[in-house]
Each structure stands twice: as structure tokens, then as C-alpha cells.
Image (spheres, rainbow, N blue to C red):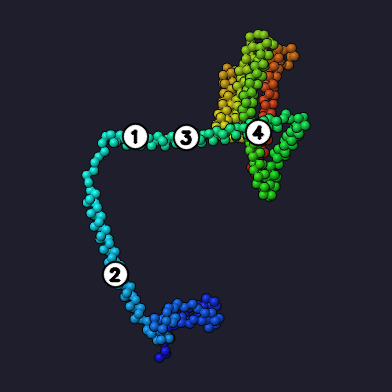
Amino acid sequence: MPSEEEEVEVFQCPACGTYVEANETKCPKCGAEFEVESYECPSCHKEVSADDKVCPHCKAVFEEETTQIEEEEVEETAEVSEKEEKEIEEETEHKEDKETITQKPTIEPSVTEKVQIKETKEEEKTEEEVLSASELMALMEKDRERFESKYDKSEISAKKLEKSIKTPSKKDKFEERKRMKVKEEKDKSLIKEPDRLFKEKAQKGDRFQVKVIKAELDSIDSEYYQTSQAWKSAFMAGFIAVMIANITAALFIALSLANVENTQTGLLYFKYAFPLFFGIVAFTGGGYIFIYGKGNSEKINAATSMIIGLGFMLGTYVYFKKVVFVNSASAMTYYAEHKLITDIASPNSPDIGILSSSVLGFVFGLLIIACIVYGVLRPAFMNNLINKKSRGEK
């Protein structure tokens, strides 16, 4: 059977870190000395380590002494606890005696005493209020002084500002105009090439510039909205222009040939030409706003305008066909009956005047409509193209 290994207590040397037995006082590797807990031997009065149970000098045994010391300590603690218990009992008895002595019938204060107590309390309160009011007054005085000093400073700064502000000279005005022109040219170039600028700025990573371009494109959108609003106003102006054109044609006929029949003919032309023109303008204008307009309300208005225009055009056609030609074989017989196109070949025929005036009025109305369409729709259409290009749409 192999011999069992004995367990030995070890600790680590604080200097070199080697493991040393617990009873060693010096490191065998580095020679460092260890501090060992020791006490004096009661028999030979020499230093002995705390772990030793037998004195190495006089061979005295320490176990009995330690047990005696422990017994003495236990006895002392028992005596102390008994003394404390006795003291506590005495204190409780003393307190009970005091309570029996001090228990006397309580006397309630009289009415006069209560009044006196109230008066004293009120006096104390008023004193506190007076003190707080004086403190408030002091604070207000400080605030007033501070405000006055600030007011004086603001007056001085206002005077300095008045001196510094001057009327702009001619040179300043010229520079301002120059700067505005440069800005306008930049804006124009930005509108022409938004895609290129977007790509360049995005590649450079200049997000601020891209935001600026977006803001300017938004301003283009607002301009487009303004042009659509202008188109609406021009739309109404077109109606008025067509009406004026047709009225002038009818009046020209009525005045040039002063008889009842020709006057009725002029009014008849006005009666059918004006609603037809009204229908054309309402339908085309409403269609444009419906396609390029923004917002549901704008598109609803445009759709109603288209429906109204279509109604006018169809109504004019149906009325002219069914009512006017109901008792006539064809248009030529109708015109012949009303002396509209009789003897057109002869230059002295009065009906040529009627026809020419009618044609002039018609052409005049068309020209006005063409001018309105060119002036209003072209910039709006261009702005719409720019917006589509800036958004990357085709």
C-alpha cells in the first residue's frame, strides 16, 4: 500500500512568489524574512509563534492556559450581562414610579388664556410678515437699480445704431444691382441644368448645396402653381374676349345693314357662335388643368369645366341641327331663306358684308384665344417640363 501524503499548510512568498511551508520564517529561494505572529511564553518569557502549542525553549504546554483564559472571559461576560439586566429592571421600576407620581388631572385653559395665546401667535405672524415685506422692498430696489442700468445701456446702443445707419450711396446701390443680376443668372443656369447640378453635388457629397437646389426647385413648383392660377384668370379673360368679338361682329352686321331682317341675322350668328366658342375654351382649358393641375379640388373644378364646355358644344350643335333645320331641306336652303349667302359672286351684294363681318369677328375671337393660349400655356408647360426633369421623370 502506498503511503498517504501528509497535508502541509503553505503560503506564497510576497517577494518572489514561491510557495513556502507555514512554519518557515525565511524564504529558501530569495531569503526574505516573514513576519510571524508571536507572543511571550508565560514560563520563560521568550517569544513564541502563535501556532506553537509547546514552547521550544522551556517545553511548556499552552493549551491549558488558553482554556483557562477562555473560561475566565466567559465568566466575565456572564457577570456583565447579569449586571445589565439588573440595571434595566431598576430603570423600568424607576420610570413606573415617576409615571404614577406625574399622573395628575389635566386642567383645560380658560377662555381668556385662549385669547391671550391667539394674540401672541398673531403678533409673531405680523412680525414675520413685516420682515418679509422689508426683504421684498430691498429686492425690488435692487431690481430697479439693475433695470435702470440696463435701460441706460440700451439707450446708448440705440444712439450708436442711429449713428451707424446711413443712407446707401450710389456706389452701394450699383453693387446691389450687380449682385442681384449675378444671382438671377445663377438661378437661370440652375433651372436649365438641374439634373447635372444634382449629380455633381451628390457625387461631391455636398448635401447642403443639394438642399439649396431642392429649395429652388420647390420655388419653381410654386411659380408653376402661380402660372396655373394665372391660367384660370386668363381663361375667364378669354371668355370675355370671345364674347366681345362676337358682339362686335353682330353689331357690325346690324349697323351696316339697317333693316330688321339683317339685324336678326347678326343676332342669330351671335346666338350660335358664342356658345360654341365658350364650349371650346371651357373644354380645352379644363382639360389642360385636369392633366397638369395639382390637388383634388383643382382637378374637380377642371373636370366640371370640361363637362360644361362639352355640354355647350353639343347643345349648340343639336339645337342648330334640330331646331334651325327642322323645316328646311339643307343648310343652303336655310341660308337662302335668310339671305345669308345669296348672290355672293356679285360684288355689290349686301350679303357679302354680312358674311365678311361674320368671318372677321370669328377670326378676331380666334386670334385673341391664340394669344392667351400662347402667353399662358407656354410658360406653364415649360415649368412643368422642368419639374418633371428635376424629379427624374420622363
Residue drawn at x 39%, y 36% is 125
Q: Could you tell me residue 374's position as x and y percent?
A: 69, 29
Give the Cα distance between marks 2 and 4: 89 Å
Report the side of 128 relative to 79 (left or right).
Answer: right
* Circle 3 residue: 134
Residue drawn at x 67%, y 8% is 258
Q: 225 or 43, which is in the foreground? A: 43
Q: Is residue 330 visible?
A: no
The crowding category of the residue bearing disc 4, from other C-alpha atoms within 10 Å (few below 14, some 14 to 19, many at least 20), is: few
The crowding category of the residue bearing disc 3, from other C-alpha atoms within 10 Å (few below 14, some 14 to 19, many at least 20), is: few
* Circle 2 residue: 78
* Above or below: residue 94 compared with residue 191: below
Q: Could you tell me residue 361's position as x and y percent?
A: 68, 19
Which of the two labelled residues, at mark 4 and mark 1, occupies the earlier sequence position? 1
The disc at residue 157 is: 4
Q: 150 or 342, which is in the foreground? A: 150
Quarter of the image with the C terminus in it: top right
Q: Residue furthest top?
A: 259
Which of the two labelled residues, at mark 2 and mark 3, occupies the earlier sequence position? 2
Which of the two labelled residues, at mark 3 and mark 1, occupies the earlier sequence position? 1
Q: Which secondary structure lies at badge 2?
A: helix
